[in-house]
Image (cartoon, rainbow, N blue to C red):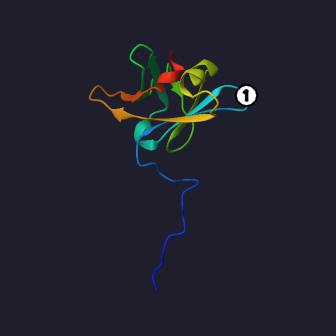
Amino acid sequence: MAFVSVVTGGRGRKRDEAGISIKYSQSGSVQCYVGVDIRDKQRFIYVELDEDSRKIRLMPTNNERGAKMSGTSGGTFSLSKKFGEMIIPSGEKKAFIRLEKNGDGWWYGELIAKNID
C-alpha cells in the first residue's frame, strides 16, 4: 500500500514562479499580491509601467512613497482601477504576470499586449 497526496492546490499553495496577481476588488479598485520571494521582508513596494516597451517592474522598499503592503509573508496592496484596465484582459476578473529579478534590484514582467493599445 502506498500513500498518494490528495491535495490539489488551494489556500497556501506556492506558485512555481515569482509574479504578481492582480484582481478587481468589490470596491472597484485593483488588489495586487506578491509572494514572499518578491516582498523580501519590506513594507512598501514601487510599481512602475512602461507602456512603450509593454513592461511592468516592481521593487520592494521601506520607503513610504511606495504602495503599502499588508500581510505577514507575501504582500497585498491596492492600486487604481486604471492600472487594472491596462493589465487585466477584457472580460476577465484577474491576471497573473510572471516576474524575473534583474541585477538592478527590480522585478520585471511583460504586460498583456492587447490591453495597452
Question: What is the x, y in percent for residue 43?
Answer: 49, 32
Which residue is pictured at 57% across the width and 28% down the height?
89
User: Which picture quadrant has residue 77?
Assistant: top right
Q: Amino acid at mark 1?
A: Ser
Q: Is residue 53 left or right of residue 8?
A: left
Residue placed furthest toward the left: 103
Which residue is pictured at 49% across the width and 28% down the height?
44
Label total for image: 1
**In front of the other: 39 or 79:** 79
Residue under circle 1? 27
User: Which picture quadrant has residue 79?
Assistant: top right
- Can the viewer see residue 41? no
- Judge the density around disc 1: few (<14), some (14-19), many (≥20) Cα neighbours within 10 Å: few
Which residue is pictured at 70% across the width and 26% down the height?
28
- Can the viewer see residue 48? yes
Which residue is pictured at 46% across the width and 86% down the height?
1
Question: What is the x, y in percent for residue 104?
Answer: 29, 25
**In front of the other: 94 or 114:** 114
User: Which picture quadrant has residue 87?
Assistant: top right
Q: Is residue 52 above or below residue 34?
A: above
Residue placed furthest toward the top: 52
Q: Is residue 71 above or below residue 62?
A: below
Residue placed furthest toward the right: 27
Question: What is the x, y in percent for residue 56?
Answer: 43, 24
Q: Is residue 38 left or right of residue 13?
A: left
Question: What is the x, y in percent for residue 34?
Answer: 49, 37
Q: Name the element at disc 1.
A: loop
